[in-house]
Amino acid sequence: MLDPVDAVVLDVTIPVYNEERDLEPCIRRLHAYLRTNMPYTFRITIADNGSTDATPGVAAELVAEFPEVSMVRIEEAGKGLALRTAWSGSDAAVLAYMDVDLSTDLAALLPLIAPLITGHSDIAIGTRLARGSRVVRGPKREAISRAYNLLLRGTLAMRISDAQCGFKAIRRDIARGLLPYVQDTGWFFDTELLILAQRTNLRIHEVPVDWIDDDDSRVDVVSAALADVRGIWRLGRALVTRRLPLALLRHDLGRSPLLPGVPAGLGGQLVRFIGIGIASTVFFAVLYALLRIEFAAQTANFTALLVSAIANTLVNRRVTFGVRGPGKLLQHLAQGLLLFGLGLALTSGSLVLLHAVHPPAAPLELAVLVVSSFAATALRFLLLRFWLGRPGRTAAGSKERAYELHN
């Protein structure tokens, strides 16, 4: 739901640092465009983060001239800090930002925010790397941009095409939910926000843009790159150690399942479960082969399957379905033992059938057990997902974790 008709629908933030020369033409051009082409009420917020030149004075003059222009002053430098401050204090339904050089064609602004206003999407970004984009910039910046996004895909599994384009928008309710967990205050702010949104299963809308590089850009590429690498390391560590309450955020901000009991993260759950299942099957086969040296086939199968089933349940509980802490651990282990019984019946039955039609042979026994173990693994996924993977259970576990982190 949007705010009442007399409230501001769109708030465009322009973060600036020592931009006394470019600020006035930027605001005049942007204001003229919005007044002519924007069908919704709007505000332009100048977020001055620690300028030491005449930028604050220029901003004050623009605020006095245009009722739709406002200003916030942040004493510390940092683009991320400027955006966090401006967005946290805004009452607009949709919060956007763009760079002061207006490198992006403003014709993309309405396509950017329209899916957010209708509720179709949660975040929208301009992209210079998608098909349909038209970009004018030097080979150095082009190579750096593409290399950075490839790095993000390889380290943080980012699916977004262009994390650093200075042309983005977010719904206010989504911003209020995500901003407390975004730590960066500089150039990595965009990337951290988008990765968090992606892991929360929010819908991110990408708009191909026309973009012309600003030859007078003051961004220190080397220092920005080093800061980004530090941000990737910090965020990657937080994701691996599960320091971020992603399940809680999915519960509070994510979209409802298309079908009851089928969470949006089914694909990710399946990939993780398959990986764990393969490792469990290898572990089971190795353990069975070792035990078979001293024990009969059924005894070796029982022991190997019991140990691997307990380990499989514990790992899937934590990694695949995001359930942490001791809550319901005994219940989940009991459910895992039930799955062990079903798996034992399936694999033992396969051995009985094999021995009924073929003389005992260790390689053939192992092959039959691997196949039947895979079948048991598929059954284990369906039942574990029913018991552990429902949104309510995952969110509850993350609420406990979020409480631990904040107390």
Image: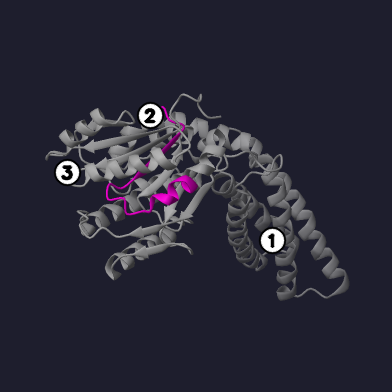
Magenta stretch, residue numbers = 90-112
Pinpoint residue 406: horizontal percent, then vertical percent.
40, 29
Comes first in the chain, label 2 or label 3: 3
Category of crowding for the residue at label 2, using alpha-carbon neighbours closer than 10 angstroms: few (below 14), some (14–19), many (at least 20): some
Inspect the magenta stretch and tell me whether residue 103 lies in it. yes
Residue beneath the point at 33% across and 65% down:
136
Residue at the disc numbered 2: 90
Vertical order, 330 against 321 (above or below): above
In the displayed image of the protein, which residue is found farthest to the right? 356
Q: Residues within 10 Å of mark 3 (few under 14, many from 20)?
A: some
- Please tell me whether residue 360 is drawn above or below residue 170 in the rendered image: below
Q: Position of residue 262 (x, y in %)?
A: 68, 44
Q: How many numbered circles are shown?
A: 3
- Residue at image coords 34%, 62%: 145
Nearer-N-terminus badge (1/3): 3
Q: Earlier in the sequence, mark 1 or mark 2?
A: 2
Secondary structure under badge 1?
A: helix
Q: Secondary structure at mark 2?
A: loop
Question: In front of the other: label 1 or label 3?
Answer: 3
Q: Amino acid at mark 1?
A: Ala
Judge whether residue 260 can be spotted in this image.
Answer: yes
